[in-house]
Amino acid sequence: ETSSQDVKYQELKDLAAINLLIERNAPQSSIRAEDPEVVAWIGIDDIALGAICKWESGFHVLSSIVVAEQMRGKGFGKLITRALIDAAYKRGIGYLALGVWAENEAAIATYRSIGFIELGKFNSFAVK
């Protein structure tokens, strides 16, 4: 469930800058700036960003949460996730979900510390 969070952030509009931060720091992310399911891009300086997306099902999810590589381990993952929760809350979105690679233990620990709970594990397969 979303709630008000005391975090400073901005709504991002520069699609090229968003994509550049993603490509440099998390190229495996599935969402890009121009994707139509994005409701809003939220950022903290040039350090971290993430998207609030609305799926065809009507559910809202957090996607492409990225922290600049040189700033990882300093609390920015938690900060940007809290900023995304706040931005969703201010938009009247009451519930959020997210997906994360199973091997990304640092991100999973961050999301759990904020209050996310694990609903399941999924496999992802690439077509070659």
Image (spheres, grey):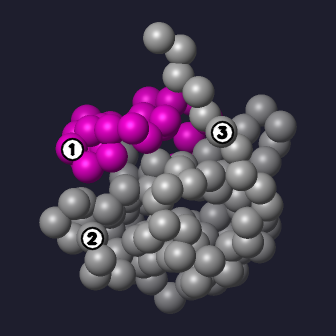
Left or right: 46, with 4 as reference point: left
Q: What label does residue 123 carry, if any?
A: 3
Residue 94 placement: quadrant: bottom right
* Residue at position x 46%, y 48% in the image: 64
Between the C-alphas of marks 2 and 3, the distance is: 26 Å
User: On the image, numbered disc 2 is attached to which residue?
Assistant: 72
Q: Is residue 47 above or below residue 29?
A: below
Q: Amino acid at mark 1?
A: Arg
Q: Secondary structure at mark 2?
A: loop
Residue 55, x across and y down, in percent: 72, 38
Q: Is residue 90 visible?
A: no
Q: Nearer the viewer, residue 123 or 16?
A: 123
Range shown magenta? 14-40
In front: 39, or 107?
107
Q: Position of residue 59 (x, y in %)?
A: 79, 48
Give the side of residue 54 with respect to residue 13, left or right: right
Q: Earlier in the sequence, mark 2 or mark 1?
A: 1
Say which label, 1 or 3, has the lower sequence index: 1
Between tags 2 and 3, which lies in front? 3
Using residue 47 as the reference point, say whether residue 30 is left or right of it: right
Q: Nearer the viewer, residue 101 or 82?
A: 101
Q: Which amino acid type corresponds to the residue marked 3 in the rendered image?
A: Asn
Horizontal and vertical percent for residue 52? 58, 52
User: At x 16% / y 66%, what residue is drawn?
Assistant: 70
Q: What's the distance in space between the residues labelled 2 and 1, CA to CA?
A: 13 Å
Callout 2, which amino acid? Arg
Residue 92 placement (x, y as % from top left): 74, 64
Say if the magenta span includes residue 27: yes
SS at badge 3: loop
Q: Residue at x 58, y 84 (%)?
A: 113
Q: Circle 1 is placed at which residue position?
A: 24
